[in-house]
Amino acid sequence: MIRAVLIALLLASLAVGSYVVLPIEQVEIVGNRQLSRAEIERLTGLEPGRPWLWAWPSRLEALKQNPWVNSALLERPAPGRLRIVLEERTPIAHLVQGQERYGLSADGVLLPGAPARSPVLEGRGELPIADLLLLIHTFPDAKRIRYNLAGYQVVTPGFVVWGRSVRELQDWAKARRIGKSDASNPLAHPGASTESRIYVYSWGVSARR
């Protein structure tokens, strides 16, 4: 019993001493663009005045759960000083789901509070994140991508294309790129015309003006 009390007193003394003898004097945050300093300090509990000796990497676990954070490291450049190095995710598209708005990162994470940008993703049914990422990569000039149970529609400045599957749209886009330098390609004409509405099927392509 006496031993347990002594250990408790020792730990309490160390805790108080860590505040007085070696507190955190400076916290440098590197790489944050979306998250504020106040938000990072709230999530980690790392701020001036807290004990420097107790600043373990585990303090970053709550921060790493934030969808904007791709990675986070804790460095100790000098006694009393800390450096938090962040890599934040970047939105590559803007997702509309009812009244909700999100950014979509390249690794398929939804980012709340992201600024609007192209392409805009919208549709009905289960969110097909993997398919949408493939379409964003396939059509880098897309302004809007719509999805539903019937298929996908991609809107670009020069044409609107619909396909039942991502694979069919990818095959059409590949043929269109080849067709720009090969007038004999049967898929060259629909992709080359401006303001076309193109429908891609397993059996062929239909184009309308």
Image (tube, rainbow, N blue to C red):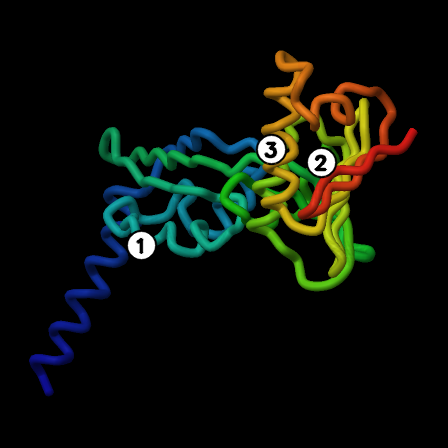
In this orientation, does residue 120 appear?
no
As drawn, the label of residue 138 is: 3
Q: Please report whichever mark, 3 or 1, sits nearer to the chain's N-terminal start.
A: 1
Q: Please report whichever mark, 3 or 2, sits nearer to the chain's N-terminal start.
A: 2
Tag 1 secondary structure: helix
**Residue beneath the point at 59% across and 45% down:** 167
- Does 121 sit left or right of 133 as displayed? right
Place of residue 100 in the rendered image (x, y in percent of width and height, measured from the top left): 76, 54
Place of residue 114 in the rendered image (x, y in percent of width and height, measured from the top left): 67, 40
Q: Nearer the viewer, residue 71 or 122?
A: 122
In this orientation, does residue 176 appear?
yes
Q: Amino acid at mark 2?
A: Pro
Q: Please report whichever mark, 1 or 2, sits nearer to the chain's N-terminal start.
A: 1
Q: Amino acid at mark 3?
A: Thr
Task: Give the residue number, with chain letter if any, for mark 1.
Answer: 58
Foreground mark, 3 or 2? 3
Task: Give the residue number, with chain letter if any, for mark 2.
Answer: 115
Q: Amino acid at mark 1?
A: Ser
Q: Is residue 184 above or below residue 172?
A: above
The image quadrant where one finds the C terminus is: top right
Task: Pick out the residue farthest to the left.
Answer: 3
**Residue beneath the point at 45% across and 50% down:** 63
Q: How many marks?
A: 3
Q: Nearer the viewer, residue 112 or 120?
A: 120
